[in-house]
Image (cartoon, helix red, strand yellow):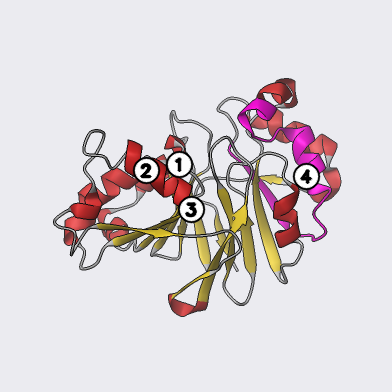
C-alpha cells in the first residue's frame, strides 16, 4: 500500500489543507480540502471513501468530487462509514437542500454514490488483498480510526479522538505496525478546550502513547494553524523517546 497525505491541517489558508489521504490510486481516507488538489483523472479513479467521522473538515470535498467526475464513472463511489455518520450525511448534506442526494442520481438503480455501513473491528477487504479495519475513537460525534493492512505491513490512523483506552486494545495486537498517525489539535495551554472538544493536546497525547506497547514511527497531525510548531515542541519535550514527527502534506508512506 502507498498512502499519500493530501491534507493534514486543522484549518485552511495558504498551502494548508484539511484531513484527506489517498490510498494507492482508488481510496480516500477522509475527504477534506486536500482532495481538491487532485487532477480530474485522479479524482475519477476514486472508488472508495472511508470516513472517520462527519465533521466538515473531513467530508467537505465529497460533494464536489461526485459532481465533478461522478458522471464519467461506470460504477458508483462507495462511501464507507459507521451508521451514525451515514445518518448525519443523509440528514444534513445529501438532503437536496445543502447538496443533491447522489444516491438517487441519475436514478436509484444506477447511482453515482452508494453508502456502505461499517463496524468497529470488522475488516473490509479491497482488491489486491488490502484490508481496512475500523478502530474505536472518542470524539464529540460518533467516530472511528482505521488500521490499513497490506499484508506486508500496517499503518494506523486514529482520526479525531481524545483519550480512549479501547483503541490500544486493538493497536497493541497488530503485527507489523510500521506507522501510527495520531492527532494533537491544541497546545497544552488549551488542555481544557481539548477535553471539551474531545481532541488531544501534548500532555494527553503523551498519556495515550504510554499505553502503546509497540514501537512504530509516530506522526502527529491536525494542528490548529499557527500553533503547529508550538504543539510539536511540547510533544518532543514530553516524550523525546518516541521521536514523534509532524505529519506533512504530500508525505508518502509505503507499507
Q: Could you tell which of marks 3 and 2 lies nearer the N-terminus?
A: 3
Rounded to the nearest angstrom, the CA distance separating label 1 from label 3 is: 10 Å
Rounded to the nearest angstrom, the CA distance separating label 1 from label 2 is: 7 Å
Rounded to the nearest angstrom, the CA distance separating label 1 from label 4 is: 24 Å
Q: Could you tell which of marks 4 and 2 lies nearer the N-terminus?
A: 2
Rounded to the nearest angstrom, the CA distance separating label 4 from label 2 is: 30 Å
CB under 8 Å between callouts 1 and 4? no
The x, y position of residue 137, in whole percent, is: 63, 47
- Dot 3 falls on a residue whose secondary structure is loop
Residue placed under numbered mark 1 in the picture:
54
Q: Could you tell which of marks 1 and 4 lies nearer the N-terminus?
A: 1
**Which mark lies nearer to you, 4 or 2?**
2
CB under 8 Å between callouts 1 and 2? yes
- Dot 1 falls on a residue whose secondary structure is loop
- Dot 4 falls on a residue whose secondary structure is helix
- Residue 17 seen by the camera: no
Q: Residues within 10 Å of mark 2 (few under 14, many from 20)?
A: some
Which region shows up in magenta?
194-222
CB under 8 Å between callouts 3 and 2? no
The x, y position of residue 170, in whole percent, is: 71, 61
Residue placed under numbered mark 4 in the picture:
208
Amino acid at each position: 500500500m502507498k498512502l499519500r497525505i493530501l491534507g493534514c491541517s486543522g484549518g485552511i489558508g495558504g498551502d494548508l489543507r484539511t484531513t484527506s489521504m489517498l490510498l494507492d490510486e482508488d481510496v480516500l481516507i477522509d475527504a477534506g480540502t486536500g482532495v481538491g488538489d487532485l487532477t480530474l483523472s485522479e479524482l475519477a479513479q476514486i472508488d472508495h471513501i472511508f470516513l472517520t467521522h462527519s465533521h466538515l473538515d473531513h467530508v467537505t470535498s465529497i460533494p464536489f468530487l461526485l459532481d465533478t467526475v461522478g458522471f464519467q464513472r461506470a460504477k458508483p463511489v462507495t462511501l464507507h462509514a459507521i451508521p451514525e455518520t451515514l445518518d448525519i450525511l443523509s440528514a444534513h448534506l445529501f438532503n437536496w437542500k445543502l447538496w443533491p442526494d447522489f444516491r438517487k442520481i441519475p436514478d436509484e438503480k444506477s447511482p453515482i454514490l452508494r453508502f456502505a455501513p461499517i463496524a468497529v473491528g470488522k475488516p473490509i477487504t479491497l482488491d489486491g488483498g488490502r484490508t481496512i479495519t475500523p478502530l474505536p475513537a472518542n470524539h464529540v460525534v460518533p467516530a472511528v480510526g482505521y488500521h490499513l493492512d497490506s499484508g506486508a505491513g500496517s499503518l494506523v490512523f486514529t482520526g479525531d479522538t481524545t483519550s480512549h483506552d479501547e483503541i490500544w486494545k486493538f493497536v497493541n495486537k497488530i503485527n507489523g505496525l510500521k506507522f501510527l498517525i495520531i492527532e494533537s489539535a491544541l497546545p497544552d495551554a488549551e488542555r481544557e478546550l481539548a477535553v471539551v472538544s474531545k481532541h488531544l493536546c501534548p500532555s494527553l497525547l503523551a498519556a495515550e502513547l504510554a499505553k502503546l506497547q509497540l514501537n512504530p514511527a509516530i506522526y502527529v497531525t491536525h494542528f490548529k494553524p499557527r500553533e503547529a510548531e508550538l504543539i510539536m515542541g511540547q510533544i518532543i519535550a514530553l516524550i523525546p523517546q518516541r521521536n514523534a514527527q509532524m505529519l506533512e502534506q504530500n508525505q508518502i508512506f509505503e507499507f
